[in-house]
Image: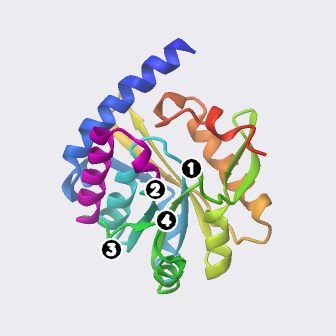
């Protein structure tokens, strides 16, 4: 446990400093996409990319845009920033500003109108949506799933948006290799949402096989904050 915490601290330190390197050239040099054929067949239709706060997750979007030519943005939470210390809040605001200069359109925040997200996807674009987010004091629509051997409650918004737009949802996970000093961006097979619970579980099970041996690359504790919520 202590070893995992130490590795997570070191990885978070690396990732925070790496933000300064983000640009299109960096994504070409440092990101290898695995499973690109899964999403390229939907390039003209758009879809939802469900992700976790694992690895250099913001870099995923830059790679999709530069390496595959997709139109992409993501949903982000600004609500939780007001509970952070000023220096930490300022850090994330700076990151959001930088990401906006590379994504196909500015980030869509959770306080924005839901129609912004629906319109973006229905116009044949791609939208990244995180499973592992809980907004303090908000009416979070959570769903129980099994992940890494434990029951957790994650957001159902990725699959609900896929169902509402009639577009597929793809598992998306980016993992850093300290040996090769490269990021591996995995795009899973597309899922058509019939059951929110069943699809969420299938998507996360695909991601689980990638992250389970590298849990130190999670940006936060992936279990404790998401248990015992109901």
Labelled pair 1, 4 in contact (Cβ < 8 Å) = no
Q: Residues within 10 Å of mark 4 (few under 14, many from 20)?
A: some
On residue 36, the disc is none
Query: In the image shown, does 199 or 25 lie closer to the viewer?
Result: 199
Q: Are marks 1 and 2 in contact (CB under 8 Å)?
A: yes
Q: Is residue 129 above or below residue 152?
A: below
Q: Answer with left or right where residue 39 lies relative to residue 143.
A: left
Stretch of the chain drawn in magenta: 79-101
In this rendering, the label closer to the viewer, 1 or 4: 1
Q: Nearer the viewer, mark 3 or mark 2?
A: 2
Cα–Cα span, label 4 and label 3: 15 Å
With respect to residue 168, does 210 lie above or below? above
Q: Which mark is residue 110?
A: 4
In this figure, which residue is indicated by the disc labeled 1? 136
**Which residue is located at x 75 percent, y 64 percent?**
196
Q: Are marks 4 and 2 in contact (CB under 8 Å)?
A: yes
Observer-nearest residue: 81 or 38? 81
Q: Could you tell me which quadrant the N terminus lies in?
A: top right
Q: Earlier in the sequence, mark 1 or mark 4?
A: 4
Residue occupied by mark 2: 79
Q: Which residue is disc 3 drawn over?
A: 105
């Amino acid at each position: 446990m202590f070893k995992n915490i130490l590795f997570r601290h070191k990885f978070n330190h690396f990732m925070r400093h790496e933000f300064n390197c983000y640009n299109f050239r960096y994504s070409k040099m440092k990101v290898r996409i695995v499973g690109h054929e899964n999403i390229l067949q939907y390039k003209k239709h758009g879809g939802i990319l469900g992700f976790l706060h694992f690895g250099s997750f913001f870099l995923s979007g830059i790679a999709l845009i530069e390496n595959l030519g997709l139109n992409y943005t993501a949903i982000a939470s600004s609500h939780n920033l007001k509970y952070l210390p000023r220096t930490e809040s300022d850090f994330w605001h700076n990151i959001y500003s930088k990401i906006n200069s590379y994504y196909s359109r500015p980030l869509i925040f959770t306080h924005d109108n839901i129609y912004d997200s629906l319109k973006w996807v229905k116009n044949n674009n791609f939208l990244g949506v995180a499973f592992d987010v809980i907004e303090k004091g908000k009416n979070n629509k959570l769903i129980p799933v099994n992940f890494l051997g434990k029951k957790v409650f994650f957001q159902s918004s990725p699959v609900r948006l896929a169902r509402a737009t009639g577009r597929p949802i793809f598992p998306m996970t980016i993992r850093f290799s300290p040996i090769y000093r490269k990021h591996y961006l995995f795009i899973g097979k597309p899922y058509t949402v019939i059951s929110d619970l069943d699809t969420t579980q299938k998507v996360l099970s695909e991601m689980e096989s990638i992250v389970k041996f590298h849990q130190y690359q999670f940006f936060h504790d992936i279990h404790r904050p998401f248990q015992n919520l109901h």
